Image (cartoon, helix red, strand yellow):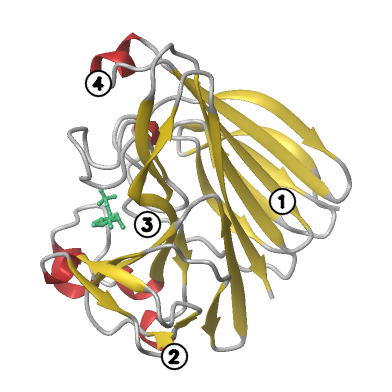
Amino acid sequence: MAITGIEHIELKGIPALRLSIANGASAVLSLFGGQVLSWSPPAGGERLYLSPLAAHDGLQPIRGGIPVCFPQFADLGPLMQHGFARTAQWTVLTERHGKDFALVSLGLSDSAATRALWPHAFEAELSVLIEDNRLDLELEVGNRGDSEFSFTAALHTYLAVHEVEQTRLEGLHGYSYRDKTDANRIKRDSGDVVEIEAETDRIYHDVQRPLLLREYRRSLGINAEGFADVVVWNPWVERSAAIADLPKDGFRHLLCVEAAAAQHPVRLAAGERWWGRQTLVEL
Ligand SMILES: O=P(O)(O)OC[C@H]1O[C@H](O)[C@H](O)[C@@H](O)[C@@H]1O
């Protein structure tokens, strides 16, 4: 019988935790970056894309899984792309499991290194739960300083798909989005579904609906709370060629559907806390 519970493992030299439950679902969470690297629901089959060329040197970001972008999403500010959380060492705060669930929360707080980049006292907590056919991630940020700060953030989920051109993303009809592939023009989605047939890099604003990712013979529900925006990213052929840690045809097997707070930075007064959550449900 498969081991259930929470094991401390190493994945290509990176310290990580493996969460497993009795129904056969499992997930792997790296302490470097506080990054989920794998999730298999009870029916089996990996649902997250992890690049075979991803760095595992504990320095560079890991291409794939669910990177945490904080305190900056993409290049929306003066920090390095996607902020420092995805290349920081997180620590284990809690581990809990029963027959039907496994929950780990990791913490990251300010240090001399983070204050040199971003001069604020913060604590971030990432909780990762597997239960039934779900993966649930929650990012909570607290301001433990004495003045307000603001940040942008995302759970940059790389979904594994069989063939991206045959994948349909439903639920974004009618929402406006910022199109990074077209000079950041604001557009309105008028299609019934989003299909990927070219480089796609969009921030959809104020998305209120759950999304559905449909593929041949499988579907995934994607829900978010607290994060106002949804980013849809696929680098397609030309941009992929410039991404050293992605194989040539890697873009065909991934679609990033990210829960983000990007359009409007989150403002936190001293002592305040914020949280955002993304849930993936195998249907
Ligand atoms: O290559 P990375 O720094 O990991 O960023 C990968 C991508 O992340 C997000 O989806 C952004 O919207 C894209 O513009 C960016 O290219």
Q: Pick whichever of labels 2 and 1 is earlier in the sequence.
A: 1
* Amino acid at dot 4: Leu
Label 3 Cα crowd, 10 Å radius (few <14 / some 14-19 / many 20+): many
What element does badge 1 sit on? strand
Residue 197 image position (x, y, % from top left): 27, 85
Residue 5 image position (x, y, % from top left): 79, 40
* Residue that mark 1 sits on: 130
Task: Give the CA distance from mark 2 to mark 4.
Answer: 42 Å
What element does badge 3 sit on? loop
Q: Pick whichever of labels 4 and 3 is earlier in the sequence.
A: 3
- In-front residue for pair 15/121: 121
* Amino acid at dot 2: Asp
- In-front residue for pair 91/176: 176
Task: Give the CA distance from mark 3 to mark 1.
Answer: 22 Å
Give the number of the disc on residue 51. Answer: 3
* Residue that mark 2 sits on: 192
Q: Pick whichever of labels 2 and 4 is earlier in the sequence.
A: 4
* Residue that mark 4 sits on: 117
* Ligand 1 picture quarter: bottom left
Count numbered badges in the picture.
4
Label 2 Cα crowd, 10 Å radius (few <14 / some 14-19 / many 20+): few
Q: Pick whichever of labels 3 and 2 is earlier in the sequence.
A: 3
Task: Give the CA distance from mark 2 to mark 1.
Answer: 31 Å
Residue at figure coordinates x 42%, y 52% from the top left = 260
Residue 264 image position (x, y, % from top left): 34, 48
Q: Residue furthest left?
A: 183
Task: Give the CA distance from mark 4 to mark 1.
Answer: 33 Å
